[in-house]
Image (cartoon, rainbow, N blue to C red):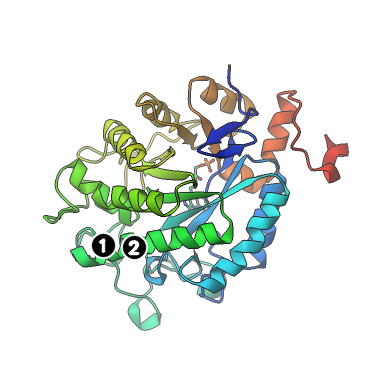
């Protein structure tokens, strides 16, 4: 049976194990210029040295107005590419594959980070204080934030172009994997969900219409970067009546693979307040549902022990992703291998005596 410490392939890329680090915003760019900082170098360096097979760095904006906060990282210019290059090179030197999650926050853009240069404020940043008018699939506000303006058809076409340009820059920086963020209530999820998409242009209508922008983006990145693995992150349920369902997500996952994606990560929620049954492995069934379409899938969400992770992979899910457990202990993958009694060749030599 396949286990979490076993390698796997995504397109031409070999990953040394199936314990992946989930993308996690650090909101640590105090210069507001999208350029990763010393914090990112140390944080991602520790995670890369911790044994993961695939480290995917935080939601990184494809255009400045696609940032969740002004403290987000970006990939819209060359200075950002240059700064990412060092982080990528260090990860590679540790034997970790590294990807970047590309994002446009849509109606959830222009918010305060709640710390750092932003201070302790929360919610939408008013335009007079350096915020901006957000755009979305419709004028429906998301999670109590300032009302967006519906993006025009041309603006959505430009978003696709921005994702492709950012993917090209990611490849330039040396990233092995590009992840398209279509989860957690951000722009691509705002388009996918019937709760927020009320459009009558080619980006709206039935599920296929609502998936148009996501699939265009995947298709165009694939055409641009034929060998780079593409992961799509979905909110595989909105957890409310009338929202996206696990079956919808499985359908979109199949389409994403036809468009050129290699794997789908099954997260959930983030668009509307919902009663989510949070508990150990509470989203793993969503990844399992997607694997039944023949799609490579990863599971995420309160997977916090080696045993639990093994069970998820043994149920046919291809990989697990860990978030908060890795914030507490960046060497969680190495610790899990040790707890399972597995012999692995990815312990940094400097740390061999600890294992
Ligand atoms: C500090 C923090 C930042 C996060 N930022 C992102 C992000 O940038 N992109 C994303 O898709 N999910 C983000 N998430 C969600 C995680 O990727 C993950 O799905 C979630 O934490 C559940 O996994 P866990 O229970 O292992 O932490 C974030 C979570 C945390 C705790």
Position of 76 with respect to 149 (left or right) is right
Label 1: how many Cα within 10 Å (few below 14, some 14–19, many 20+): some
Q: Is residue 150 above or below residue 46?
A: below
Q: Which residue is drawn at 72% across and 47% down?
A: 94
Image coordinates of residue 227 in percent, x first then y, are: 49, 46
Query: Picture quarter containing residue 151?
Result: bottom left
Position of 38 with respect to 214 (left or right) is right
Q: Is residue 160 above or below residue 8?
A: below
Label 2: state its secondary structure. Answer: helix
Question: Which residue lies most toward the left here?
Answer: 200
Q: CB of residue at label 1: within 8 Å of ligand 1?
A: no
Number of marks in the rendered image: 2
Label 2: how many Cα within 10 Å (few below 14, some 14–19, many 20+): some
Q: In this view, does 313 lie above or below 70?
A: above
Question: Which residue lies most toward the bottom here?
Answer: 128
Label 1: state its secondary structure. Answer: helix
Q: Is residue 272 visible?
A: no
In the rendered view of the protein, which quadrant contains the N terminus? top right
Image coordinates of residue 135 in percent, x first then y, are: 27, 66
Image coordinates of residue 256 in percent, x first then y, are: 34, 41
Per the image, the residue denoted by label 1 is 157
Position of 232 with respect to 53 (left or right) is left
Per the image, the residue denoted by label 2 is 161
Query: Picture quarter containing residue 142?
Result: bottom left
Q: Residue at x 52, y 55 (%)?
A: 58
Q: Can residue 32 be seen in this view?
A: yes
> Between 47 and 256, which is closer to the camera in this rendering?
256
Determine whether label 1 and label 2 are within 8 Å by CB: yes
What is the number of the mark on residue 76?
none
In the rendered view of the protein, which quadrant contains the C terminus? top right
Image coordinates of residue 311 in percent, x first then y, are: 55, 22
């Amino acid at each position: 049976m396949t286990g979490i410490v076993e390698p796997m392939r995504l397109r031409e890329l070999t990953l040394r194990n199936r314990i992946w680090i989930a993308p996690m915003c650090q909101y640590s760019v105090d210069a507001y210029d999208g350029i990763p900082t010393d914090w990112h170098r140390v944080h991602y360096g520790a995670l890369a040295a911790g044994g993961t097979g695939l480290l995917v760095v935080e939601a990184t904006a494809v255009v400045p107005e696609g940032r969740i906060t002004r403290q987000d990282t970006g990939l819209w210019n060359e200075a950002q590419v240059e700064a990412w290059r060092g982080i990528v090179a260090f990860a590679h030197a540790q034997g970790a594959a590294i990807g970047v999650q590309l994002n446009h926050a849509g109606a959830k853009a222009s918010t305060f980070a709640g710390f750092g240069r932003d201070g302790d404020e929360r919610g939408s940043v008013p335009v007079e204080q350096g915020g901006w008018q957000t755009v979305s699939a419709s004028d429906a506000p998301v999670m109590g934030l300032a009302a967006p303006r519906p993006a025009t058809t041309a603006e959505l076409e430009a978003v696709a172009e921005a994702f492709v340009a950012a993917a090209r820059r990611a490849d330039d920086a040396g990233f092995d994997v590009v992840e398209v963020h279509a989860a957690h209530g951000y722009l691509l999820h705002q388009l996918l969900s019937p709760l927020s998409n009320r459009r009558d242009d080619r980006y709206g209508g039935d599920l296929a219409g609502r998936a148009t922008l996501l699939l265009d983006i995947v298709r165009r990145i694939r055409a641009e970067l034929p060998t780079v693995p593409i992961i799509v992150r979905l909110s595989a349920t909105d957890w409310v009546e009338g929202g996206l369902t696990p079956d919808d997500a499985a359908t979109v996952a199949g389409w994403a693979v036809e468009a050129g994606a290699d794997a789908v990560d099954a997260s959930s929620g983030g668009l509307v307040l919902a009663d989510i049954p949070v508990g150990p492995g509470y989203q793993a069934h969503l990844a399992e549902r997607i694997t039944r379409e023949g799609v490579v899938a990863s599971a995420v969400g309160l997977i916090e022990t080696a045993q639990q992770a093994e069970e998820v992979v043994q149920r046919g899910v291809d990989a697990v992703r860990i978030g908060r457990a890795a914030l507490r202990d960046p060497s969680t993958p190495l610790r899990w291998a040790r707890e399972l009694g597995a012999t692995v060749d990815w312990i940094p030599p400097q740390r061999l005596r600890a294992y």
